[in-house]
Amino acid sequence: MRRFEFRLEQVLKVKQQHERLAELRQQQARFRLEATQAEVAAVQRQIQELAVALDKGIHGAAEQQLWMAHYQRSRVLGQSLTAAEDRVQHAQQELDQADVRRKQLATEVEALLHLRQEQWQAHRQEVARAQQEHLDELGMRRWLTGQQN
């Protein structure tokens, strides 16, 4: 009897490799998102620390220079926060795209695995039917041989 052969086995293997790569890209995108979120949190902490320092109050001419330095620092931190939030948004979009791609490939792999399973079941039924026909033929020959004697 012929052995089972799934004609789309190579396609399945390639799709499975692509799925693994998509999972890696998804993980990388998740790490980038987490890193950019940590960056935003760090900038927000710096802004909070600066706000606490400003809240203590500044008096006199020397402290006016300190106030100007704090003001400049707050401007820079505000720009840094905006840029970091933009990177978070971009990283989130990348993660969303990676999720969609991985899900698409997982669906394709699952469909091919299901098709292979169906073909395997059909092959097993065909083999069982062929074996049964062979046994029936042997039984019939023996019966006929017994009838002739």
Image (cartoon, rainbow, N blue to C red):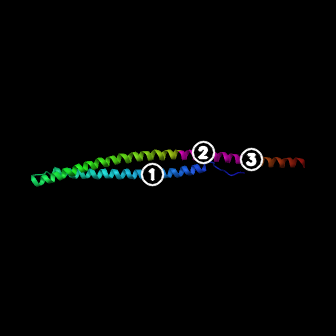
> Disc 1 or 2, which lies upstream in sequence?
1
Q: Which residue is mark 3?
A: 132
Q: Which residue is mark 2?
A: 115
- The magenta-colored residue range is 108-129
> CA–CA distance between discs 3 and 2?
26 Å
Image point 24% across, 50% down: which residue?
76
Which secondary structure, mark 3? Answer: helix
Q: Residues within 10 Å of mark 1 (few under 14, many from 20)?
A: some
Q: Residue furthest bottom?
A: 62
Q: Residues within 10 Å of mark 2 (few under 14, many from 20)?
A: some
Q: Nearer the viewer, mark 3 or mark 2?
A: 2
Image point 41% across, 47% down: which residue?
94
Q: Are marks 3 and 2 in contact (CB under 8 Å)?
A: no
Percent position of residue 3, x then y: 68, 52
Q: Nearer the viewer, residue 43 or 141?
A: 43
Q: Nearer the viewer, residue 136 or 54?
A: 54
Which amino acid lies under the numbered mark 2 shown in the image of this protein?
Leu
Which amino acid lies under the numbered mark 3 shown in the image of this protein?
Gln
